Image (cartoon, helix red, strand yellow):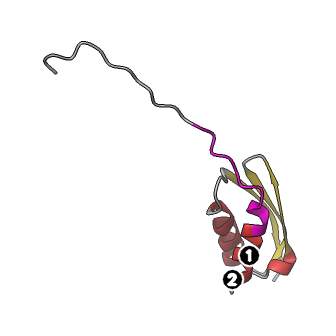
Amino acid sequence: MDGVVGLTDRISLTSGLIPSDVVDRIKRAFERNAIIDESLIEVTSAGHTIYLDGTVPDRFARDEAVGTAYLAPGVRDVVSRLVIVP
């Protein structure tokens, strides 16, 4: 542009802290979901990663659990160790 003599870039990126109650938030979301039996799934976190352990009746329930966990604030990755037991 004519007349511009300088540009200062002050954009900064933050890591976006994961809330301390993210595991509880995910468990409550599982409780509200008719497809997921939350009593069969253990949810843990480490950093920005959520780990899902337990059993689900089918692939649809597994995908629903993983998708629900991804929606929690601050979550960057979900490791599903869910086993399908029809």
Q: Is residue 28 above or below residue 34?
A: above
| Separation of marks 2 and 1 at Cα, in angstroms | 6 Å
Q: Which residues are magenta?
A: 14-24
Residue 25, image x, y percentages: 72, 68
Q: Is residue 63 above or below residue 70?
A: below
Q: Which residue is mark 2?
A: 32
The image quadrant where one finds the N terminus is: top left
* Foreground pick, 56 / 11: 11
* Foreground pick, 59 / 76: 76
The residue sitting at 15% across, 16% down in the picture is: 3
In contact (CB < 8 Å): disc 2 and disc 1: yes
Numbered circle sitting on residue 66: none
**Quarter residue 14 falls in:** top right
The image quadrant where one finds the C terminus is: bottom right
| Amino acid type indicated by mark 2 | Arg
The residue sitting at 77% across, 56% down in the picture is: 20
Q: Which residue is mark 1?
A: 28
